[in-house]
Amino acid sequence: MLTAQSLTARVDRDQLHIVSPRVHFLTGEALNRLRDGATVVYALQLTVRGERAGKALARTEERFAVSYDLWEEKFAITKLGQSPRSVSHLSAAAAEAWCVENTAIPIGVLPGDAAIAILGDTATHARLSAGARASAARLSVDAHVTALEQVFATAPHLA
């Protein structure tokens, strides 16, 4: 388990990603199995807590199928699940980093103060706040009533 002090957080397209060069999992018996031609499935879990031993504010788990090309001595990875993606020709460090980078939590599921504390970046906070205000403005009652009036005005009338 890694703590916030050993991680760097960033937001990309409203997803909270972490970066940590200290995450190493292509080791030991699993690495031996990969080098013997097996595919190994790894599950990475990202949990955000308000306090070290506090309640989980958000959690996600991603699964990755990792294989090893014996001739090129490089790794290939397929992210499993709802939006599968693949990458190949990676060194061990690049493969580990790719898996960590592709384990993200939607920023919208976090309480506002948690997102600010995690990011600690006023520019990112300002961008997220502006986006939230713009979304809230589009979702006003007046906007909904206007949209409904337009739908009913153009809908065919049943006699």
Image: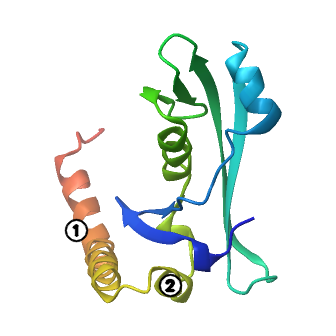
Q: Nearer the viewer, residue 147 or 107?
A: 107
Dividing the picture into quadrants, the one containing residue 26 is: top right
| Residue at x 76% of width, y 25% of height | 32
- In this rendering, is residue 78 above or below 158? above
- The residue that label 2 is drawn on is 112
- The residue that label 1 is drawn on is 146
CB under 8 Å between discs 2 and 1: no
Number of marks present in the image shown: 2
| Residue at x 53% of width, y 26% of height | 75
Side (left or right) of 118 relative to 35 = left
For the N terminus, the image quarter is bottom right
| Residue at x 61% of width, y 21% of height | 67
Q: Nearer the viewer, residue 110 or 8?
A: 8
- In this rendering, is residue 2 above or below 43? below
| Residue at x 53% of width, y 59% of height | 21
Q: Measured from the top left, where is residue 152 in percent x and y?
A: 25, 53
Which residue type does callout 1 highlight?
Thr
Disc 2 from disc 1: Cα separation: 30 Å
Asked which secondary structure carries label 1, the reply is helix
- In this rendering, is residue 7 above or below 69? below
Q: Nearer the viewer, residue 59 or 68?
A: 68
Asked which secondary structure carries label 2, the reply is helix
Which label lies toward us, 2 or 1?
2
